[in-house]
């Protein structure tokens, strides 16, 4: 497992470096927006990765509610946290891109607002996990994840309608994509997806290790308090 | 089948009546929240003091934000009595359907927040010289659907937050992001009705959809989190 | 050019955030490994 992770990380790193080269050097400069448009090669793949991670969290949460498997919960935690990181980058690079191009830092358009609401929901998810330290926290968090998933289509739909009533500048990619731009975009899309998987994998392993240590601590305190009794069998079946 | 449905509702109503009777006996909390709502209206009126035309545009937003903050105060004490007396443990082991407890609490909160709104609305009308230019009767479904949207999720998240640290801040932290489409619906519908700027029908349908989706979700998942507490 | 400032700000911000987060993961790994070692010794 560890070797697979190392190889995957290496491949991801190579993809990211190649993606950076593509984005900054190989891709042609956009006609209307200029070089600032290159932020697009980082902004959109990050958004895609964040949404994939949040979707993973939803699936993991449902699986956990159905099966109570610890691995599902660990994956839920990992994908939520890494998803928030990528989502933060989307919300940071978006305004940085918008300001020089469209003159405004922010607009309440469909994509940006939905991304912001997703970020808020998942930060609340992480706060809930941190502030709730019972054995039942995973169940509560999984329920919150489902509520969030139900909410997102409603958010999207309501803002979409609002925008049709109150049109505002659309912060889009603009125009059609030159094939070299498409190539740079796809490379970065692949690179960031792999990067997202890699970080989530690392975070997942961290979470499993954390639970292992907790269990070892618990076993140790049980052992020292009842050192004269027969040792309890370490149950690894739940892994 | 009908018997179980009857018991769900009869238990919910019985719990609700008990709650109302208990609240009525100790009117302190009630009076304090009423006064808090009054203060919210006054402070908003100081902070946002435009002339009549502009006020119709932002009144929708102001009123619902004021309702939102007042209802948080009410929602935070939803389960306080149950926690104090280990009622939740009793519910967990009893054969009573968990949903009857949830319905009782949600409807109780709903009635209570309606009272708060009934107090705050005339004050808003007075301070802002409000007059509905559009069909004023539509404000009733907006008020009912909007209030239920806040209360149903608020009651649920109050239960979710019971065993967390900083329980009081956890509730709005969870409730506000999830409520965003509902709040947009309430605010836009109110603004449209007050300034006769088109039809509020879409927003009313959105509020109805929101209410149906989340009432189902709350009823479906309340048993899960009650067992988890 | 002024606009290039924004381009580099965006790319640098991206990698600073990622580096920071990866740093916290590595730090937590080290801490847990240390705890595991301490437990093993006892």
Image (cartoon, grey):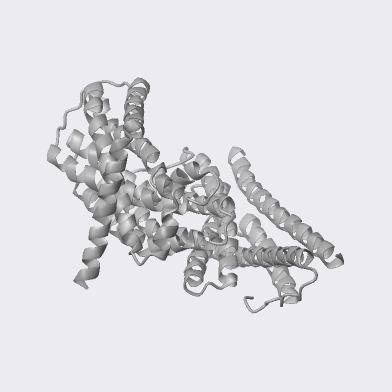
Q: B226 and B58: which one is in front? A: B226
Q: Residue at x 80, y 68 (%)?
A: A227
Picture coordinates of residue A239, whole percent (x, y): 64, 75
Quarter of the image for residue C30 reads bottom right
Counting every numbered tag in the picture gives: 0
Q: Residue furthest right?
A: C41
Query: Which of the image's four quarters has the N terminus of chain B?
Result: bottom left
Counting from the top left corner in percent of width and height, residue B93 is at: 42, 65
What residue sits 25% from the left and 30% below the top?
A: B119
- Figure check: B19 above or below A80: above
Query: Taking the image as drawn, is residue A49 in sight?
Result: no
Which of C9/A108 is in front? A108
**Residue A222 found in image quarter:** bottom right
Compared to residue A177, the image places residue B195 above or below, namely: above
Nearest the viewer among A123 and B98 is: B98
Image location of residue C29, percent across then percent down: 75, 60
The quarter of the displayed image where residue A22 is located: bottom right
Residue A19 seen in the figure? yes
Horizontally, residue A160 falls left or right of residue A34, namely left
> In the rendered image of this protein, does residue B13 appear above or below residue C4?
below
Q: Is B57 above or below relative to B138? A: above
Is residue B165 toward the left or the right of residue B13 in the image? right
**Residue A38, x across and y down, in percent:** 57, 52
**What residue is at 13 percent from the left and 40 percent from the top?**
B137
């Amino acid at each position: 497992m560890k070797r697979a992770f190392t190889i995957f990380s290496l491949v991801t790193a190579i993809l990211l470096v190649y993606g950076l080269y593509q984005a900054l050097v190989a891709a042609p400069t956009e006609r209307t927006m200029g070089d600032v448009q290159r932020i697009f090669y980082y902004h959109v793949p990050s958004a895609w990765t964040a949404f994939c991670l949040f979707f993973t969290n939803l699936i993991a949460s449902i699986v956990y509610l159905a099966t109570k498997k610890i691995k599902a919960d660990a994956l839920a935690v990992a994908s939520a946290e890494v998803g928030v990181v990528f989502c933060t980058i989307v919300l940071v690079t978006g305004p940085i891109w918008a300001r020089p191009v469209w003159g405004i830092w922010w607009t309440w358009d469909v994509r940006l607002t939905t991304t912001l609401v997703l970020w808020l929901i998942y930060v609340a998810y992480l706060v809930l996990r941190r502030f709730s330290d019972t054995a039942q926290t995973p169940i509560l968090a999984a329920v919150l994840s489902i509520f969030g998933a139900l909410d997102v289509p409603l958010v999207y739909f309501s803002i979409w309608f609002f925008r049709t009533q109150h049109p505002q500048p659309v912060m889009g990619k603009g125009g059609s994509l030159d094939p070299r731009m498409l190539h740079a975009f796809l490379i970065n899309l692949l690179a960031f997806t792999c990067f997202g998987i890699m970080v989530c994998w690392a975070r997942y392993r961290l979470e499993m290790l954390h639970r292992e240590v907790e269990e070892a601590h618990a076993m140790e305190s049980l052992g020292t308090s009842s050192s004269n009794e027969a040792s309890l069998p370490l149950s690894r079946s739940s892994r | 089948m009908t018997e179980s449905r009857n018991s769900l509702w009869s238990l919910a109503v019985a719990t609700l009546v008990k709650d109302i009777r208990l609240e009525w006996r100790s009117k302190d909390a009630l009076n304090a929240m009423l006064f808090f709502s009054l203060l919210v209206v006054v402070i908003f009126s100081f902070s946002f003091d435009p002339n009549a035309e502009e006020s119709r545009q932002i009144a929708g937003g102001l009123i619902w934000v004021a309702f939102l903050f007042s209802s948080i105060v009410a929602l935070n004490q939803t389960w306080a009595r149950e926690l104090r007396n280990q009622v939740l443990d009793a519910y967990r082991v009893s054969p009573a359907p968990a949903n009857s407890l949830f319905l009782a609490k949600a409807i109780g909160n709903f009635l209570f927040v309606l009272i708060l709104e009934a107090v705050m609305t005339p004050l808003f009308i007075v301070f802002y010289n409000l007059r509905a230019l559009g069909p004023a009767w539509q404000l009733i479904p907006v008020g009912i659907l909007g209030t239920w949207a806040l209360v149903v999720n608020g009651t649920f998240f109050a239960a979710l937050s019971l065993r967390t640290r900083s329980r009081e801040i956890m509730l709005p932290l969870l409730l506000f992001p999830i409520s965003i489409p509902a709040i947009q619906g309430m605010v836009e519908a109110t603004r449209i009705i007050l300034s006769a700027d088109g039809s509020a029908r879409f927003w009313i349908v959105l509020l109805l959809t929101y209410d149906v989706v989340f009432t189902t979700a709350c009823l479906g998942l309340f048993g899960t989190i009650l067992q988890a507490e | 050019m002024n606009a290039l400032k924004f381009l580099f700000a965006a790319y640098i911000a991206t990698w600073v955030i990622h580096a920071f987060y990866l740093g916290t993961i590595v730090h937590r790994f080290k801490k847990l490994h240390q705890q595991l070692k301490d437990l093993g010794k006892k």
